Image (cartoon, helix red, strand yellow):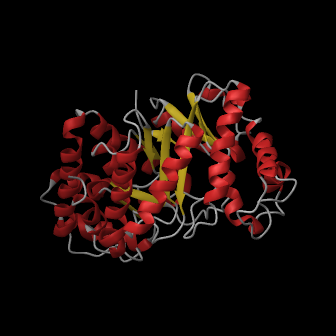
Amino acid sequence: MSVFIPLINSSTDISIYRRYYSESKIVRISQGNRDIRLGSLKNKQIWFDPGIDIYDNWNQYVDDDFWNRFLKFDDKSIFTKRKYTGRISRNDIEEFLESILNKCPDLKPAWLSIPQLPLVNDNSRNKINKILAELTYEWKQNNRFGGKLILPLILTHKDQSCYARHRNRIIKNARDCFDRAQASGTWIVDSSLSDWSGSNMLNAKKIPNIIKLHEGLNEELPLDAITLAGPYWALNLILWARGLVDYPVIGLGRGYKYNLAGGFARRGSARIAIPPLLRWAKVSPELKHWLRKSIKVIKNNTEVYDQLNSLYRDFDIYEDSDVAREQVAKFYQEWISSIENIPSAGRALALYQNFSKAFVIGKSIRNNIVSEKQARRPEQVVKQFMFHCL
């Protein structure tokens, strides 16, 4: 049974989940998506997230019926005001918390995220989050909830993990909230990180420092604490392969970057996976041209030639974003399953070898992928990953 935890946000997600990820031990759904048909998940464990990170930027959302559901939880507007401070009363927070958590037990979740506001660059939300953690434990006791409580740590700004003083502050407050809630685990995700983009800053700062954040928090947590990370494209896999998290959270053919609850995810252009390079790219005439040129360069490598030629031959069908998404989901499932089937002691090395092989293949293809904004060199995406595997 797979340790990878898919994010279920829609009926399409459930369809892809059934085809490629049904071996997953547990799936995550959030408050905003609880109305999707969950019949296919009847025999699966649910990790339920109340989704209060929607209040991080509430002013964008109040006119939509979807957000009105959350407006009902906050009838005193303690979070739905444009700005709020740590002076919110404990009683108001308790009323809000009970209104949203009392909707959870009917799903019988095995895991429940402790309601927490996303982390910001100052201390303005620390007091609120501590009260939320404390009251969640009281709610669990009063309602005899038998599931495990998971503490979310949702980063929102690019420099939150890049400086030791910020990481130390995050770790200190996380341990405090963990203890107040008597939590069973933590989930860390950086909502500002698109690790598939190939940005040079990722390699220089973000990836190694997010790894340091996990290492530092693990030193403070009990040995039996559940640890989770993602969704990302590969950083979650690196953290898992290195033994820094127990469960990588994953997207389903898309969603390899965490969007705060209620965020408007742009549909954007279709993307397909390029298996030999362990990356994806936007479906465009430029990509088709790149495939045609690259096939000629790589013709002496039969395996890579066959994979690129197959993409080129079937390219037109991937203009349908649903077909493209399924291609990505299938590739990603095969890739992560190949790593999961390796004994735990060898996974980090195997992942490094995956990235190294893709790097060499990318270097041998002299053509740039001009349709990509940042990672135009074929090997650029895996280059940022491979040195952090070991």
Residue 256 visible (yes or no): no
Residue found 41% across the figure and 68% down from its top: 165
Q: Is 326 situated left or right of 340 in this image?
A: right
Nearest the eye: 167 or 327: 167
Nearest the eye: 128 or 360: 128
Name which quarter of the figure residue 82 lies in: bottom right
- x, y percent for residue 135: 69, 41
Q: Is 83 situated left or right of 191 in this image?
A: right
Residue found 18% across the figure and 56% down from its top: 357
Nearest the eye: 165 or 105: 165
Q: Is residue 190 above or below residue 33?
A: below
Name which quarter of the figure residue 85 lies in: bottom right
- x, y percent for residue 134: 65, 43
Q: Quadrant of the N terminus?
A: top left
Residue 239 visible (yes or no): yes
Name which quarter of the figure residue 107 lies in: top right
Nearest the eye: 81 or 325: 81
Q: Is 203 situated left or right of 187 in this image?
A: left
Residue found 87% across the figure and 53% down from its top: 75
Residue found 16% across the figure and 68% down from its top: 364
- x, y percent for residue 324: 48, 54
